[in-house]
Image (spheres, rainbow, N blue to C red):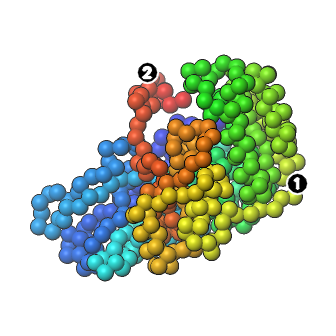
Amino acid sequence: MQVAPMEDINLHFTGDIHAITSANNLLSAMIDNHIFQGNELEIDKVIWKRCVDLNDRALRKVEICLSGEKNAVPREDGFDITVASEIMAIFCLAEDLEDLRKRIGNIVIGYNKKGKEIRARDLKAEGAMTVLLKDAIKPNLVQTLENTPALIHGGPFANIAHGCNSVIATKMGMKLADYCITEAGFGADLGAEKFLDIKCRHLPKTPDAVVCVATIKALKYHGGMPIENIKEENIEYLEKGIHNLLKHIDNLKNIYGLNVIVGINKYITDTDKEIEYLRKKLEEQGVEISLVEAWGKGGKGAIDLANKIVKLCKQPSEYNYCYDLKDGIKEKIEKVATKVYGATGVEYSKQAEETIKKLEKDGYANYPVCIAKTQYSLSDDAKNLLCNDPFKIHVKDVILKNGAEFIVILTGNIFTMPGLPKVPAAEKIDLNAKGEIVGIF
């Protein structure tokens, strides 16, 4: 099952990401121009970063304003990837254009010498930034190859941002259909946690059911099976790796109080023995399983899952948030870390401790937390797949996103600007003799 047009969706699409990049970098240009033109606001510390829609680790830290002009004050800057930018988060959480404009105006871009916040509206930037986003804020209607409508709108990374499509698109889907299905990427520790603790506070209702998607290959990998052997049948590694899936199920059922079904994306290498083992283990937990073969059979490959979801949605549930907004910043972080990740506690850098104290003093204690963490492990160590031993979460920095109305918590070795792999996908992308795009899939 695919949504079309795939090439456009994976590349430029309708310009949402380019509009977000332009709005973000317009604010950066206005900040540096204000300083150059005399710095009436007495900006002393700039925390706003530029962004670009590319994985480019060389841009994580840069030196700017090196032209030598009289009023060009050199300083350290950096780039986030666009999907991790605050503009993307605002774009996806805004209720409408008016709310978008208000949130953009509330962005804290830095501080003056007295430590007072300077916001985007102090630079009179919110109007032009909103103009750049006025068309992008309209949800994009596409369709599957079987003509089922789908809304694709926005896309913050779930490991370093809040990982959900726009509130506007979700509300539209809920209004136009009997059943609205939305995605929250990277498991119940990242995308789902942020969807449930951040985005759901902006929706008219909470989910009736959750599909926890897994693959047998991924479970064997989490059990320690070498990736080069992952296609081979192996119950031993599957048994070790199932703990990861069970933790995600436990989070959804027992922390958030939701009805859960596991959808197994079936690969041709999955054996009947492995599938039956997984089915029995999940039955012991009172969780139903559905084999999904939509990748090869289209809608027919997901009919079983659809029927089971309809039944599941009719069952009662009692939704709970992981934390209350009245909790302190540290209390929220520690509830997510211990309850959702399974950590024994949280360790904070000196910088993180100082920032948390300042944010609470400045009146931001009631904001939700958006924890940036590796997607490869329940811990903040990407190599710790099994999580057999007790672990702690390590908070290295804390960043206020006042327009998005949440606080980003950077853990472990997470970066807001990813890097390319050893063999970038770009090496395989090209145009054939007919002018058709090849190599994306």
Residue hosting label 2: 433
Q: Is residue 425 left or right of residue 176?
A: left
The three-letter amino acid code for the residue at tag 2 is Ala
- How packed mark 2 is, by other alpha carbons closer than 10 Å (few <14, some 14-19, many 20 or more), is few
Q: Give the quarter of the image for residue 40.
A: bottom left
Front in this rendered view, residue 255 or 40:
255
Residue 343 appearing in the image: yes
Q: Is residue 362 left or right of residue 278?
A: left
Label of residue 217 in the image: none
Name the residue: 26% across, 58% down: 76
Name the residue: 82% across, 27% down: 276
- How packed mark 1 is, by other alpha carbons closer than 10 Å (few <14, some 14-19, many 20 or more), is few
Circle 2/circle 1 CB separation < 8 Å? no
Q: Is residue 142 left or right of residue 426?
A: right
Quarter of the picture holding the C terminus: top right
**Image vertical order of residue 329 relative to residue 285, above or below:** below
CA distance for labels 2 and 1: 53 Å
Q: Secondary structure at mark 1?
A: loop
Measured as percent of width and height from the top left, residue 273 is found at 79, 22
Measured as percent of width and height from the top left, residue 134 is found at 49, 63
Measured as percent of width and height from the top left, residue 183 is found at 66, 49
Residue hosting label 1: 314
Q: Is residue 313 left or right of residue 168?
A: right
Residue 140 appearing in the image: no
**Image vertical order of residue 70 relative to residue 122, above or below:** above
Q: Secondary structure at mark 2?
A: loop
Name the residue: 30% across, 63% down: 29
**Image vertical order of residue 439 relative to residue 327, above or below:** above
Q: Give the quarter of the image for residue 322.
A: bottom right
Measured as percent of width and height from the top left, residue 103 is found at 50, 71
